[in-house]
Every structure is written in structure tokens, then in C-alpha cells.
């Protein structure tokens, strides 16, 4: 079961419109983001990838110097249901001995067909020496030659991909499952403003084309689609991350918040850490100077000029920021109210009490307002 699920998880394909929407945000912010740059699209399937299509079709508009796209050999994939495309079989380079075991590289640098422009029809390809694994020496070399790496990588080996990406020390933009922002290697990079959320909002997840029948959530225009809670993560600047959240004061929130929980319960102070509980990003009080515990989804709205990230209470990523054990007293009260959570008195968690009822906050990011410039 687990293996089958993992096998399915890596084979889904990003929609053209989603790539276009995201890339356009970087161009709006800086029209030269991609000018004279070499862009590498690893973990792709260039014959049907919308990443390759988008960057090839927009090669001149973006001002690219070189576009490289690599794919992973079918025999190395977990899901092996594959037929070579006509593009490959009708090419003089087609090799029946290589088609299933070698990766492929597609490259665009010049006008090969004399059309007067460089576009998707000018893509040149050949088989790689190996299977196209992003960790292989030949793809690492391409990473090192690139200026910008863009992809939707295999989530089943996300930590390995992320390590590979950081080692490259390049600009990048990639899609990942939302929960990766709480991974122990990822969160510190976000906290330190080395990487951030892309332009596309987090809510609603994203729809991807899938070739795995049992993975289909919906058929849209005859195409099998799967919904994945996804986020773009990047170290390329865009405008949305510099737009501060528009927020009400604490006094106004307590009177007018759309959340009954805020109007009736206010902002409880944690018993294990000097901070207040803010269960909704839109209820962050604009005038509170202390530390606040906010939901993970705050990161979608995080503007580094408006807030700083202090840390988190999430197990495995909480740095030692001084959260105290929840203690026997809180545990006894919690149990006496019928609480059945698997907590113990020595756990360092964010707990509080509202109207006499002991509560434990879900995973929180701890933030503080930046002083006004
Ligand atoms: C989520 S899919 C995305 C494909 C494409 N980038 C897109 O968005 O349309 C990830 C792809 O990475 C491939 N892959 C899996 N392991 C890989 C590896 N070690 N190296 C390179 N690609 C890999 C998968 O087979 C799959 O085609």
C-alpha cells in the first residue's frame, strides 16, 4: 500500500497556466529576472512537460541565454507505465536500447530551423549517459552551469532534492507539498529569509495532470487531474512578499473580528512561553509588540518588512527558544476536562487556558512585529 502510494505520488504534471501565473509575478517585479540566464529544468519529462513548453515558447520574451531540461529514465521511475512519444521514436536519434534506461536532455540555445526566432521547434535533444537522476554527476554539472533552477521535483525524495538544490547555490523556484515548510531543513531557511513562498496563494491546493488512474480526483476537459496541497518556494524576489498584511488593532479585533473565537476568547497568553495565541492570520493584531503564535499558513502572507520569524513549536524544528514543559498542573486540568491527546507533562508545547478550559495550540510559527521604519 505504502509503496504503491509513494509510486503514484511522484508522477503528476504541472499545468501551463500555473507556471505562467507564477513566472509572470517575477517578471512584473523585475522584467530582467531571466535575461541572459541559463535555466535548468531537472526532474522534467520534456516531451510533455509544461515547464519545458513554457520556457521554450517564451525563450525570447524572457531573454534567456540557454534552456536545459532533463528527464528521468522510465526504468528508474517507480511508476513504469510508459510509451515513448512520436517525437522520440520518429527522431533519427531514437535508440530502442536506450529509451527506457537513459535520461534525456533537451536544450534550446539557437534558431536551428531558420525560422528567424528561437522557440520550442528549435529544441535539440539526446540521451544522457545515465538515467537522468538529478544527483548524477552529469545533472549536477548542469546545475552548476545554470543560473536558475525551476521544477516540480519528486516529493518522495524531497529532502535529497532540497539538499541538492541548496548545494548548487543558485537561484531557484520549485513546487513542493505544503507540509515541507515544517521540515527541519526547510524551516530555518524560511526563518532566515533565504527562501520564501512564491506568488501563488496557498489556499485550495493546485491541480496537476496525473497519468495514474487511481490517483484521479477529477476529470477536467478530458484530462485526469489530482489535487495536491502545494506551494512554490523560491529565493527569487517578487512583489507579493513585500506587501504588508492589512490588519486591525487588537482593540478592533476584539470587537469586530469575523472570528467568534477572537471576539469571545481574545488572545490568550501561553502558559509555557511569553507570547499570545493568534489562531488566524487575519486576526493578527497590528499593534501588538510582543511575540505571537500564528498558524503555519501565515508563511503564505509573510512580509519580512512587517514581521520577523522567531521560531516555532513544531517538533523537530523548534530551535531552543525557551518553550517550557507543559507540566503536571496543566496535564491534570486537561485530563479533568476529558482531554485525550497524547501529551505528557515534560512536553514543550504551547498551552493556554480559555474560560477555565485548558487548550493546546496546534503547530505554530512564532512571530513579532518589526519596528516601523
Ligand atoms: C512531480 S513530477 C513533475 C514532473 C514535471 N516537472 C512537471 O511538473 O510537469 C516529478 C518527476 O521527477 C521524476 N523523478 C523521480 N525521481 C527522480 C530523480 N531521482 N531524478 C530526477 N527525476 C526524478 C519523476 O519520475 C517525475 O517525472
Image (cartoon, rainbow, N blue to C red):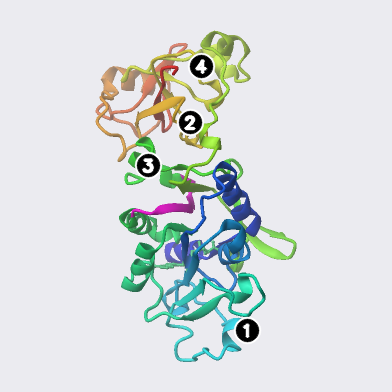
Q: Which residues are magenta?
A: 169-178
Label 4 and label 1: CA atoms lie apart by: 58 Å
Say which element carries label 1: helix
Task: Identify residue for label 3.
Answer: 194
- What is the quadrant of residue 187 in the picture? top left
Q: Could you tell whether 128 is left or right of 221 in the image? A: left
Task: Identify residue for label 1.
Answer: 86
Task: Identify residue for label 2.
Answer: 303
Say which element carries label 4: loop
* Residue drawn at point x = 34 percent, y = 68 percent: 141
Q: Are marks 2 and 1 in contact (CB under 8 Å)?
A: no
Q: Residues within 10 Å of mark 4 (few under 14, many from 20)?
A: some
Say which element carries label 2: loop
* Residue drawn at point x = 41 percent, y = 15 percent: 353
Between disc 2 and disc 4, whose residue precedes? 4
Q: Is residue 357 visible?
A: no
Q: Nearer the viewer, residue 190 or 304?
A: 304
Q: Is residue 354 visible?
A: yes
Between disc 2 and disc 1, whose residue precedes? 1
Say which element carries label 3: loop
* Residue drawn at point x = 56 percent, y = 11 percent: 254
Report if residue 177 lies within the magenta region.
yes
In the picture shown, does residue 262 fall above or below 170? Answer: above
Label 3 and label 2: CA atoms lie apart by: 13 Å
* Residue drawn at point x = 55 percent, y = 46 percent: 26
Q: Position of residue 17 (x, y in %)?
A: 65, 55
Report if residue 113 lies within the magenta region.
no
Label 3 and label 4: CA atoms lie apart by: 25 Å
Q: Position of residue 350 (x, y in %)?
A: 36, 25
Between disc 3 and disc 4, whose residue precedes? 3
Amino acid at each position: 500500500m505504502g509503496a504503491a502510494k509513494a509510486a503514484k505520488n511522484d508522477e503528476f504534471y504541472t499545468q501551463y497556466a500555473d507556471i505562467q501565473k507564477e513566472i509572470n509575478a517575477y517578471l512584473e517585479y523585475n522584467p530582467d529576472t531571466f535575461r541572459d540566464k541559463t535555466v535548468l529544468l531537472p526532474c522534467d519529462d520534456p516531451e510533455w512537460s509544461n515547464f519545458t513548453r513554457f520556457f521554450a515558447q517564451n525563450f525570447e520574451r524572457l531573454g534567456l541565454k540557454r534552456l536545459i531540461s532533463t528527464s528521468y529514465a522510465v526504468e528508474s521511475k517507480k511508476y513504469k507505465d510508459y510509451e515513448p512519444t512520436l517525437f522520440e521514436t520518429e527522431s533519427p536519434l531514437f535508440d530502442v536500447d536506450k529509451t527506457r534506461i537513459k535520461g534525456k536532455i533537451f536544450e534550446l540555445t539557437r534558431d536551428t530551423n531558420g525560422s528567424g526566432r528561437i522557440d520550442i521547434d528549435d529544441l535539440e535533444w539526446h540521451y544522457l549517459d545515465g538515467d537522468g537522476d538529478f544527483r548524477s554527476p552529469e545533472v549536477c554539472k548542469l546545475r552548476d552551469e545554470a543560473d536558475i533552477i525551476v521544477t516540480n521535483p519528486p516529493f518522495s525524495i524531497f529532502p535529497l532534492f532540497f539538499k541538492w538544490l541548496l548545494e548548487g547555490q543558485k537561484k531557484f523556484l520549485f513546487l513542493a507539498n505544503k507540509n515541507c515548510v515544517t521540515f527541519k531543513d526547510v524551516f530555518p531557511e524560511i526563518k532566515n529569509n533565504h527562501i520564501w513562498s512564491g506568488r501563488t496563494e496557498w489556499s485550495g491546493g493546485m491541480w496537476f495532470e496525473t497519468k495514474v488512474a487511481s490517483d484521479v480526483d477529477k476529470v477536467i476537459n478530458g484530462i485526469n487531474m489530482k489535487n495536491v496541497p502545494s506551494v512554490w518556494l523560491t529565493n527569487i524576489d517578487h512583489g507579493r512578499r513585500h506587501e504588508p498584511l492589512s490588519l486591525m488593532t487588537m482593540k478592533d479585533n476584539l470587537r469586530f473580528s469575523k472570528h467568534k473565537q477572537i471576539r469571545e476568547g481574545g488572545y490568550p497568553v501561553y502558559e509555557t512561553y511569553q507570547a499570545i495565541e493568534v489562531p488566524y492570520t487575519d486576526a493578527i493584531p497590528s499593534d501588538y509588540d510582543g511575540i505571537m503564535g500564528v498558524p503555519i499558513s501565515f508563511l503564505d502572507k509573510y512580509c519580512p518588512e512587517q514581521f520577523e520569524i522567531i521560531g516555532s513549536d513544531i517538533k523537530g524544528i523548534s530551535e531552543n527558544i525557551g518553550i517550557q514543559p507543559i507540566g503536571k498542573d496543566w496535564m491534570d486540568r486537561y485530563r479533568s476536562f476529558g482531554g485525550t491527546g497524547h501529551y505528557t507533562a515534560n512536553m514543550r508545547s504551547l498551552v493556554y487556558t480559555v474560560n477555565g478550559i485548558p487548550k493546546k495550540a496546534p503547530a505554530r510559527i512564532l512571530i513579532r512585529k518589526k519596528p516601523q521604519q
